[in-house]
Image (spheres, rainbow, N blue to C red):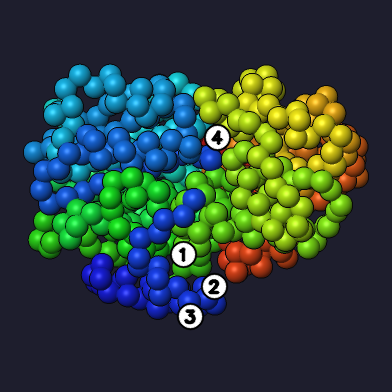
Amino acid sequence: MKNLKQHREDYLKQFQTEVYGRNLLKVEEPMDSPTEECGIFGLYSDHDIDTFSLSQFGLFALQHRGQEACGISVMKQGKIYNIKDEGLVLDVYKVIREPETFMGNSAIGHTRYTTAGDKKKYNFQPFFAKNEYDQIILSIAHNGNLTNAHELKKELEEEGVVFKATSDSEVILRLIQKNLDLGLRAAIKATMDKIEGSYSVVGMTRNKFFAFRDFHGIRPLVLGAIDENTYVAASESVALDAVGAQYVRDILPGEIVFTNENEPGLQSFLVRENCERRICAFEYIYFARPDSTLEGINVHEVREQSGGKIWEQAPVEADIVIGVPDSGVPAAIGFSIASGIPFRPVLIKNRYVGRSFIIPSQEMRERIVNLKLNPILSEIKGKKVVIIDDSIVRGTTSKRLVKILKDAGVKEIHFRSVSPPIIAPCYLGIDTPSKDDLISANMNKEELRDYLGVDSLEFLSMDNLISILGSDRHCFGCFTEKYPVPAGVHPEFVDE
């Protein structure tokens, strides 16, 4: 079995020569450059550290990935302590009366965003399993969606396994628990061999830490180190920065990293060799923070380049370019640089309102748009304006934004989306469970232009998106209806 250092060296060599055809020798250096499924965070050290504060910092950096609930599990002196509740990260940590209880040598945490299914407290993560003495023996946090969870749940229930939640994440927990007698690594391997879909997972037993990623690496999972004895795994590299960890690499598709009492540090095991990387393209377009680096690619750079590409693809005469905060702003800057049309930060965002795409209720999504954005009237009245947004999903936000600008006296509106049209549901972790919710699946570009009430409309082409990402080895399912794994039937119970 390769050790972590050997895996790291192989990873860098493979990335240099095979993945994106660019020099990535600097990938081992910490990245510092400028959402939403769930965010996961894991921390392990061979000695006691301030897991309470570090997990709080790491999860706070991932708050954009989920704002409904938060939870942590901490390993301390052979015991696991757990807390989870509704609200933002800081809200949940405030209710912890005795922080020292959550100071140990390992912690995992989760910020929750419901993609579908039940939003009750029993679905909050981390999930944990207990023994006959009512002691927690296993805890996990999961980002992704399983496409065969329903069938696996039925199988396990027929074997007598009792489920306490309605989330597909609990299927992962129960499969690992069922096979723990084989040893931790074997239990995780047996689980990965059965589950299908997308998953990045961090977890712990009472004396071990682990993390693993699906065979296509659809959901992101990065690995960092604070020192030679303290490791961090998280959904995005910004969580590493938040705790002072140096980026080591992305955890590979099909890889398990874990601790072993017989060997120092983290060990690495590939369940399958030569897995094909297919990370979700939407991570770069919308989900991830702009200062994150995923698979060696900086998110901010992708967004800025997409603005330049859509100018080349669909030039237009205008007075100013505006970006829809936050993920549309880097693309608007790229559009401005390429076109020479001045960029203006005209749309003022209320920082206390979450993204509309992350609000589960459609009624609330519609109401919240007017609270989120307000234009500076003097900058746009009588002007020809280009609006740059990351995507058009349901069309609700875009239509209301156009109305706001028209009411402010804009002369012309040219709308540019720096993603291709979203035409297909996602079964792998995005809030698009039905074609009925996707406006581009129900209208062609001309119909959508008329619906929005804009003078012109253009989407980034698939060819340009692939060019920016440097590879077609991504999940483009929401744009093409072709998925890297069998889509199956959307599970009745899915969470993250």
Residue 133, located in which quarter of the rendered image?
top left
* Residue 20 marker: 2
Label 1, label 2: how far apart the Cα atoms are: 9 Å
Expressed as whole percent of the image width and height from the top left, the position of residue 113 reads: 49, 33
Q: Which mark is residue 296?
A: 1
Residue to which mark 3 is pinned: 17
Mark 4 and mark 1: Cα distance apart in space: 27 Å
Q: Residue at x 64, y 21 (%)?
A: 371
Going by the numbered disc 3, the residue's amino acid type is Thr
As drawn, is 311 to the left or to the right of 306? right
Q: In the structure shown, which secondary structural element does the residue marked by tag 4 occupy?
A: loop
| Amino acid type assigned to the residue bearing label 4 in the image | Thr
Residue 228 % position (x, y): 17, 60
Q: Are marks 1 and 2 in contact (CB under 8 Å)?
A: yes
Find out whether the residues at labels 3 and 2 contact each other: C-beta distance under 8 Å.
no
Q: CA distance from mark 4 to mark 2?
A: 31 Å
Q: Which label lies toward us, 4 or 1?
A: 1
* Marks 4,1: beta carbons within 8 A: no
Which image quadrant is residue 302 in?
bottom right
CA neighbours of label 3 inside 10 A, class few (<14), some (14 to 19), many (20+):
few
In the rendered view of the protein, which quadrant contains the N terminus? bottom left
Q: In the displayed image of the protein, which residue is found farthest to the bottom?
A: 17
Q: Residues within 10 Å of mark 2 (few under 14, many from 20)?
A: some
* Label located before the other in sequence (4 or 1): 4
- In the rendered image, which residue does mark 4 sit on? 115
| Relative image position of residue 467 (x, y in whole percent) | 66, 68
Q: CA distance from mark 3 to mark 2?
A: 8 Å
- Tell me the crowding category of disc 4: few under 14, some 14 to 19, or many 20 or more residues within 10 angstroms, Cα based: many
Amino acid under label 1? Gly
Instruction: State how far apart marks 1 and 3 are (Cα).
Output: 13 Å
